Image (cartoon, coloured by chain):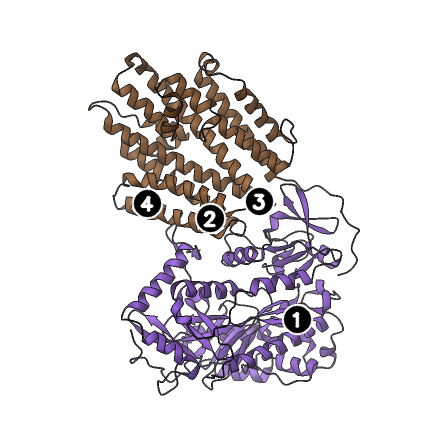
Chain colours: A brown, B purple
Amino acid sequence: MLSRVADSLYWMSRYVERAENVARFVDVNTLLSLDLPAGYVEQWTPLLSTTGDEAVFAEHYKTTSKRDVIHFLTFDTRNPNSILSSISAARENARMVRQYITLEMWEHINRFYLAMHSGARAAQKGIAPHQDFFSEVTSASHLFLGITNATMSHNEGWHFSRLGRLIERADKTSRILDAKYFLLLPTVDAVGSPYDDIMWSAVLRSTSAFEMYRKRFQQLSPDRIVDFLVLDREFPRAIHYCMLSAQECLHAISGTPRGMFRNRAEQQLGRVCADLNYTQVRDIISGGLHEFLDDLQRRLNSIGDAVHDAFFALQPTPVVPQYPAGREA
Amino acid sequence: MLFPTYDTGGFYDEMFENDGSARPCARLLFKRISSLNDGELRVYQQAAEQALFRMGITFNVYGDEAGTERIFPFDIIPRIVAADEWAVIDRGLRQRVHALNVFINDIYHEQKILKDRVIPAELILSAKSFRKACVGLNPPRGAWCHITGTDLVRHEDGEYYVLEDNLRCPSGVSYVLQNREIMKRTFPQIFDQNNVRPVGDYPSHLLQTLQEIAPSRTTDPTVALLTPGVYNSAYFEHSFLAKFMGVELVEGRDLVVTNGRVMMRTTNGLERVDVIYRRIDDDFLDPSTFRSDSLLGVPGLMDAYRSGGVALANAPGTGIADDKVIYAYVPKIIKYYLGEDPILANVPTYVCWEEKERRHVIENLDKFVVKAANESGGYGMLVGPHSTADQREKFRGAINADPRNYIAQPTLALSRVPVIVEDHFEGRHVDLRPYVLYGKDIFVLPGGLTRVALKKGSLVVNSSQGGGSKDTWVLADTGVSC
């Protein structure tokens, strides 16, 4: 398939996934703040680090009030990773491959975009987004995924789209864990207090993992939460799951058997998977979770670059014609 | 909403006779619309507009607030063409497109028509659209112009006239298909028993036409549609056609010429392209042959084309027959090559290049429509009766400075159709652009783009100048005429 088309499919999905994650972070944090005691300082700045946009925020805002952070993450077009910016970018990428994706996918992403714009227009008039707005973003993203899986052939383009989504998701899960873990650790002293429980469950809810975690481990504990969000092979937002599935995509695209590699992207992703396969949660904690996640994010970025080099940025090289030279005009 | 207050205003109305009764071919439609409850029609009109937004059939408004998008205005009252009228249009278009293809082939080979002095040779050689790079080329079966979108207008005498030939990259066919789709979704009951001929098979015919011109080395040619990119105003159409043909949609940067072959950059290396349906003008096609500042094209494309490495549709060079001065000679072209009288008449045209005709035009600027030979989209045009003295003065200067570049035509009283204006109907002027595919067979799509000048009294139907469109119904032959 065309490199440019593959590139757009990959980013289309990445941006939809990004919007979904941001929406869930905001949603969970808002609900969490309602449970916290009066006088407790609300934690809105860590949200900025989960999207990596603290610098952009500091450039445009003087305070870090709830309202400012929510606006910045939701409708601010100066923030390239706000929900509105992400969905605009996803739709722009979809527009560039409109001939390749299905009509259902296009119409959905277009509707998604229009809904974000009408939300933004309301916000301009001072009407803050209703809480439901954020769950609507999440379900619109799920719907897009479902429509993609149900209407598009599971061909090379579909694998690129899935790859983008998985890499983005792994990145976001690692960021939310990184940001929250250190804020929450001090409260381990107050183990057993209701707030401890509430805040840890908020971490799980931020990755939509609460119910699945409960089914596996029941009691909340920081180590098990790390175990679940990093190393679980079955939970679709766990980093390990994302990496294994991303590996499937890459091998489906290149046709290389697993355990072998034909390009840097496959090689690097294979190493990450191998590391996760043979890591236990106590290894992570003893070596430092932050260091572990930081390293993982660097490797994810590097995989993203390698995918770009291997598939999207093809330089023309002379090729041997596969047929006898033609004569006619 | 009913018709009693509707006034045909003394124009030929596509739906009503002068006495206000519905034309025979429109009676059923009239009955359906009249039977609707008050307000129903506006609900359908709004539903159609909503559907266009939802489907993202929009264009960006430049210079407007970021994120502002508009739809091309669409009016849900269809324009009807009766079967017997269509039969004439169909035959006329086949004849015309055939003759024009023979003409282009002659111009790039022996130039018999110039030697026989049917057309002055200077006119051809002075045309900007004459491509020296195309002299002596032999596209398959001598077909140069595979896709045509001829503009027709109906005058107050009730006759159709050819206004322009559009032999380069005619656009709009996606709106024909899309308008029909929208109508079927939002207003299905109106089709009942009307025997409207379907238009949905156009992409299949187009694909076949493109595959037929593939270099003969392959039985399974790769077809690609070359677009200037996502910011082009016709991008929707490009993606629409690529999608419904299932072919690749490429930009210049996706293509590269190596070893005389056009290749596209894929995730799996370079892959060969056999046929390119290009929606980029000749000028921008290949910076190494035509305009060197073009960023849209593919360096080396013309060489690959000349050596048979790739087929192009339309072939480069067709613009010569699309020159508005050459247009004036098309009746003679038909007679010369086919020995037939034209079935569809030209609009009477004054060629300013001829001294006598120029003088007549200059003296009567307020009565004529003046057009520049090489412009399209409603640009470079003076509508005399609606012009100011200032504008006429400007054109007078321009014509005298470069008479070769101007033609003039009498202002036509374009036919009108009813459109919905708030809570009532008003008449608006329309044209009709049918589409013709010239392959092994000639295919005329039974339908076309009806463009409406939505501004009251306006005669300019171009979308860039405030025009909208309507679904166009060509009726199957059931013995009802208009």
The location of residue A32, given as percent across then percent down, is 28, 28
State which mark lies toward you, 1 or 3. 1
What is the C-alpha distance between the residues marked 1 and 3?
35 Å
Figure check: A262 above or below A191: below
State which mark lies toward you, 2 or 3. 2
Few, some or many residues within 10 Å of mark 3 (<14, 14–19, 20+): many
Identify the amino acid type marked 2: Met
Identify the amino acid type marked 4: Ala
Q: Residue at (57%, 72%) from the top-left corner?
A: B373
What is the C-alpha distance between the residues marked 4 and 1?
53 Å
Near-viewer residue (B456 or B267) = B267
Question: What's the mark number on residue A4?
Answer: 3
What is the C-alpha distance between the residues marked 2 and 4?
23 Å
Q: Residue at (30%, 23%) from the top-left corner?
A: A199
Identify the amino acid type marked 3: Arg
Near-viewer residue (A258 or B53) = A258
